[in-house]
Amino acid sequence: MIERLSDFLCGWRTLSVPPEERTRTFDLMYRAGIPFTKEHPMPDGTITVRLRGKNGARFRAYAEREEIRYTLGKEQGLPVIISFLLHRPAIPLGILLAAGWLFWSTRIIWDVRIEGAGKTDPAEIIALLDELGCGIGDYFPAIDFNDLHAKYAAAQQDIAWLSVYMNGTVAEVQVRELWRDERFLPPENMYANVLADADGIVEEVNVREGQACVKPGDLVRKGQVLISGVIVQKDGSIRCEYADGEVICRTAQPIRVEIRTEREENVPTGREIRRKRIKFFKKTINLFINGGTLHTNYDKIYTMEQICPFGLCEVPVWWETITYREYETVMRKISAEEAAEEAMTVLAERIRTAVQNAELLSRRIDTGFSDGVCSIDCLLYLRRDVGRTEEFPESDACVPGTGETPQTDPR
């Protein structure tokens, strides 16, 4: 082992001597004081030995003087490698850069993984951690994780406890969520009335806070106070509350749909421009030259894909593509039957939206076609809560129906 290491460090060459020159060669090396190692006879009688360092050049000088036939192999070992690298400086520079990158990359965050987030969107947690200096591409030896945990807890209200620990280059985040209080808390020093958002006939009144101003069977108009947040007491003073409740009414909601048989449409031309860039950790590198001629009318389509080599693991490199797809505006004409079919489709979607929070009692539909326009008039009869909340400060409080502001109770 030591001999091999010495040969590698000093460099060596293989000397091959034919059988007839064996005696003269060894006599020459003994007289000239040229050391050798690894003497090895070959089947054809040829002898091979190793000469270290500059001994190969010394032997050549003596052998040419004595006219000895020999074969001297190429130089091998560390000196040859060093000489090769000195004549190609890009190789050692690349090795140094690779070593530096390897050292640095093992100390930055490559990925952030969230555990324990049920109600909170993991993307929100990752975004806030990134703002606090613990995101993909950050140098984690410089992160004070105790300080990070405290800052995160102070910056949000949904997580009771959060812990970040490094598993190699992956930031493992464990969270414990708070049970959110879903109850509505009115703003401080603000009160509210419940007003009607449509005309209707009252069928049911359910008051949770405030005082009812209508009863079943009353006809109400849009904007009328249904539940008042101003409570008039027996002594004439008032007490303000944040009115809340339901007022179920029978209402009529009109819907009108118009579809023209001739209209403008955007049609793709098939021409598009794509611009690509690579996002590496937090650095974005454009793979295109800024500028260029874009289309006059175009749709902009943005896609991002994280690179996963051979499907084995995801790396913090994203491939971003921005596509500018050209279109032109043309006049398109459809038949009356196609217009009527499209109008019915639009009407069905609007009815579906209107009855999401209501009970559909009945409907009346009238259709018509005039001057290239297919029209549908629909009247929906619904049973729904028509109340909407309107806030007011205490200074604006007034008794419903009078518009007067009574004196407040000094108590």
Image (tube, rainbow, N blue to C red):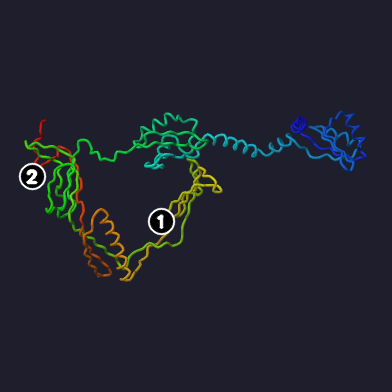
Check the picture and name the quadrant holding the N terminus: top right
How many labels sit on residues?
Answer: 2
How many other residues sit within 10 Å of disc 2, few (<14), some (14-19) or many (≥20)? few
To which quarter of the image does residue 45 belong?
A: top right
Can you give x and y, in whole percent of width and height, for residue 141 in the image? 50, 31
Name which residue lies at 37% across and 37% down.
177
Earlier-in-chain disc, 1 versus 2: 1
Residue 411 placement, left or right of 312: left
Can you give x and y, in whole percent of width and height, for residue 181 in the image? 29, 38
To which quarter of the image does residue 345 belong?
A: bottom left
Name which residue type carries label 1: Asp
The Cα–Cα distance between marks 1 and 2, rounded to whole angstroms, is 56 Å
Q: Which residue is mark 2?
A: 402
Residue 214 placement, left or right of 379: left
Can you give x and y, in whole percent of width and height, for residue 347 in the image? 28, 62
Q: Are marks 1 and 2 in contact (CB under 8 Å)?
A: no
Q: Which residue is mark 1?
A: 299
Q: Secondary structure at mark 2?
A: loop
**Does 274 appear above or below 230?**
below
